[in-house]
Amino acid sequence: MSLSKEKFVTLGKFGAPYGLAGFIKITSYTEPTDQLLKYKPIFIRTKKSLEELVLADSRLFKNGKIVVKLDSYNSPEEVRVLTGLELVVARDSLPDLEENTYYWHDLCGLKVISDTGVVLGKVDYLFNSGASDIIVVKGNNKSEILLPYIDSVVKQVDLEAGHITVTWDLQSTE
């Protein structure tokens, strides 16, 4: 199977082993957290290949943390080799979104331009602060700008043109 980044979307990654029976922690990038386990098939991306994830068990804790037991791993030593590897799904298996809503991975790499024409940089990544989603914009000088993803700031997302227009009063970081 092709490893093309355009064909797959990262939904999470493996963390540290958990317990003595071969469970491993997962950091999920989905909302809600356990949505990650509902996608089928999920693949483990290694440097050279994709391996389908075969779960023997999974547990969701009240704090939103997920641990899984894979079918062929039975000890912390065996499962430790997965730490840091990504969990991916085929892009075309993701559900369609409503108009003017976007997957975060589609926003990464877009140029961010103020409504006054100042180029602020490119979207590096997004995260949720609790109050709102935050866009982390990196300029050429490696500075970071944190922009709240709210209607009063994000004016337009144009995936085809490759940019986001925002209302933000800042000098160019490029």
Image (spheres, grey):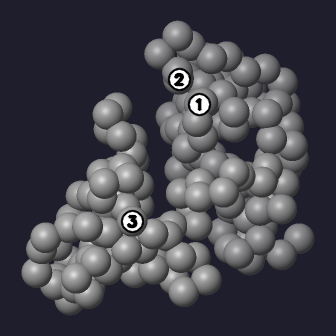
**Residue type at tag 3:** Lys
39 relative to 59, above or below: below
Tell me whether the residue at label 2 lies in contact with that at label 3, contact meaning CB atoms closer than 8 angstroms: no
Tag nearer the camera, 2 or 3: 3
Q: Residues within 10 Å of mark 1 (few under 14, many from 20)?
A: some
Which residue is label 3 attached to? 155
156 relative to 53, above or below: below
166 and 25: which is toward the camera = 166
Question: Which residue is located at x 83 percent, y 62 percent?
Answer: 92
Is residue 156 found left or right of 81 in the rendered image?
A: left
Residue 23 found in image quarter: top right
On residue 33, the disc is 1
Which residue is label 2 attached to? 65
Q: CA distance from mark 2 to mark 1?
A: 8 Å
Residue 121 found in image quarter: bottom left
Q: Secondary structure at mark 3?
A: strand
